[in-house]
Amino acid sequence: MTGFSFELNATDGAARTGVIRTPRGEVRTPAFMPVGTAATVKAMLPESVAATGADILLGNTYHLMLRPTAERIANLGGLHKFMNWEKPILTDSGGFQVMSLAGLRKLTEEGVRFSSHIDGSKHMLTPERSMEVQKLLGSDIVMCFDECPALPADRARIAESMALSMRWAARSRDAFGDRPGHALFGIQQGGLEEDLRAESAEALVDISFDGYAVGGLAVGEGQEAMFGVLDYAPGMLPQDKPRYLMGVGKPDDIVGAVKRGIDMMDCVLPSRSGRTGQAFTRRGVVNIKNARHADDPRPLDEACGCPACTGYSRAYLHHVFRAGEMISGMLLTWHNLRYYQDLMAEMRAAIAAGTFEAFETAFHGRRAEGDIEPI
Amino acid sequence: MTGFSFELNATDGAARTGVIRTPRGEVRTPAFMPVGTAATVKAMLPESVAATGADILLGNTYHLMLRPTAERIANLGGLHKFMNWEKPILTDSGGFQVMSLAGLRKLTEEGVRFSSHIDGSKHMLTPERSMEVQKLLGSDIVMCFDECPALPADRARIAESMALSMRWAARSRDAFGDRPGHALFGIQQGGLEEDLRAESAEALVDISFDGYAVGGLAVGEGQEAMFGVLDYAPGMLPQDKPRYLMGVGKPDDIVGAVKRGIDMMDCVLPSRSGRTGQAFTRRGVVNIKNARHADDPRPLDEACGCPACTGYSRAYLHHVFRAGEMISGMLLTWHNLRYYQDLMAEMRAAIAAGTFEAFETAFHGRRAEGDIEPI
């Protein structure tokens, strides 16, 4: 596809580092994508998100199609201009969030009919409508519309769901058409069933996509089961295309996923935790609301270069959290996003240097010591 | 006083422009001081507050002495370090806010006994304790502890209150002592009574302060009555010291106060309005929640250089306000603080050029036209 490409620069075991090139800029992989659900990464200005080291954001089709609507965003020049973010944007298909509306949605071969959580208005999402919405938003990386059961689920349910997702993948591919500079990613399903994962990968490769997601994980199965799937699932996908693990995760989830060959991830955890007073640091999680921080003059993380760590004590961060001040969420979100981006940069360097195993040992080791709360 | 000085550079009618010099930097006057109640200007990082053009912040003694406590802030290196603001800070005395705790406080000659609004704990504020707290905070400009009735109030009540405030002013002066580089300001009282204002000014000048505030206004009397007092009150205070109008106000209040010889002001209005979706612009107030903005691609204020105006449409600002996103308060607060600082800069330039009357005509004129809501 013109204007969209993936270059693999180095591997270390299954771990990979490279670069995705788009007309809106490069994405260094492995990449972590902050989540900008409603056209904003909560508590952050977009220039601050970029300053953390993020090359790409994720936007949520479900939320944006309901408010302010994709048509309105298109009329205003697209999502990039609307939210003042010039770098690449990946949008999900809306499928995952629509499926989460238990009781408010009806699934058919055609798609999903659902009621808005905002005003109860009725909507229909299909592969075709999802492609249309993501085009209206102007997203650089478009995701197929798929279906995904929560785990545990029985094999028949998973197989049926996967087959439906593969039919929807073909319809997504047809509806997407040819859009130079924009990419369409397929999504592998199959739960924890290796043969279904293989079948799904084969179906997707037959259709042919610009990248492939490992879907249907981080939905209740636990880290061990997820890593079990990641031991084989990425290897079923083309080596020369980016591989995206959706909705993951905690720092050690991310390290384990990269180790197993994942190139892209997204998660609300760093931003959501920032607003609830949890900070990720090189030595574990700090719960800033704990009284032990009230007189502590030290920064959250001595090794971090973010504004929260270079400008403020834990005592200050504790104070503003307790006082309910917005700066608490602003600073901790910034810190957490910077922590995640620093982690990605460290992994990219380790893979390029062929030292990923040493990195991983150090990562787990430094989190085990420490005067602060373990994750 | 060593290290603290005021230089008057130009006058235009009663309006004045100059500079306050402190060891922490210069304050260009007329100056607007954003309010950082709980060691943060709500929804702003301090570097962003500085970027709006603010030379000085106001901190609230009442809030800080209760949480996190002045002693804790002192142990952590003072308020500047605590909140990461290196420029000058003015702190109020705590008096005004304690007096507002109707039913929760008891006034005597000694001071005010009150219960914390946070946890009900008992505290006492006296002139001596207020000086101690403000010293612990490390504020650059310390305010006398005073008492101030809401208006309207009868003359006897105002006279009695003013006399008490003058006795407290003398005790504040004694307790403040000699602190090179730090200033103590007296506060004129007397309500709307010209002779009481004169008596108060005389008492304060006898005690001798580094600056003088016009207190007891913006407490319910209305703009006309306030301007009535400002027609004479600033002239009763020394020409060679800064004059501070406390708790004011709307943009047209500020223009009217500067016209009448005021050098410093503070108000929560720009930051509070920012969080409730009101934006001050050169053509009036924009209520961003109104549906009319939903599709409007224009910036809030074409002439404004703040991030909200250079990066976003009214449609975006409307969307994030409706969605309850923190970026709404962040951007609108930044805009409002920038608007206020731009207004001060414009007035300083007009006074220096001897064109304040033309400025004032233009200010009122451009706010009368327009496609947006009048103030």
Image (spheres, coloured by chain):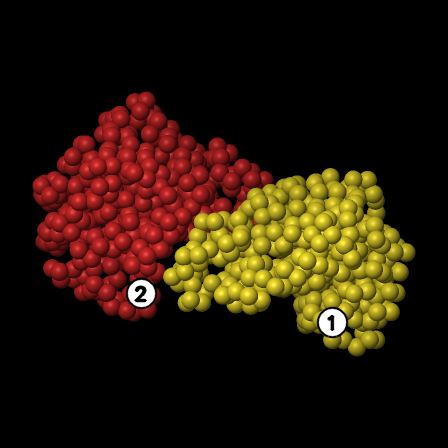
Chain colours: A red, B yellow
Q: Secondary structure at mark 2?
A: loop
Crowdedness near tag 2: few (<14), some (14–19) or many (≥20) residues, C-alpha within 10 Å: few
**Residue under numbered circle 2:** A117
Q: Nearer the viewer, residue B368 or B327?
A: B368
The picture places residue A124, in percent across and down from the top left corner, at: 21, 63
Mark 1 packing: few (<14 Cα in 10 Å), some, or many (20+)?
some
Where residue A229 sits in the image (x, y, percent)?
Answer: 19, 40
Tag 1 residue: B225
Chain letter behind tag 1: B
Between B222 and A282, the residue placed more toward the observer is B222
Residue B36 drawn at (x, y percent): 62, 53
Q: Where is residue B205, by image quadrant?
A: bottom right
Relative placement, left or right, of B347 versus A218 is right
Real-space Cα separation, disc 1 to disc 2, in angstroms: 50 Å
Instruction: Return the residue found at the far right.
Output: B206
Q: Quadrant of the N terminus of chain B?
A: top right
The chain ID associated with circle 2 is A
Residue A22 in percent (x, y) is at 28, 37
Q: Quadrant of the C terminus of chain B?
A: bottom right
Residue at position x 55%, y 59% in the image: B281
In the rendered view, does B287 fall on the left or right side of B199?
left
Nearest to viewer (mark 1 / mark 2): 1
Q: Which quarter of the picture shows residue B252? A: bottom right
Q: Against B39, is B218 above or below?
A: below
Amino acid at circle 2: His
Identify which amino acid the numbered label 1 is placed on.
Ala
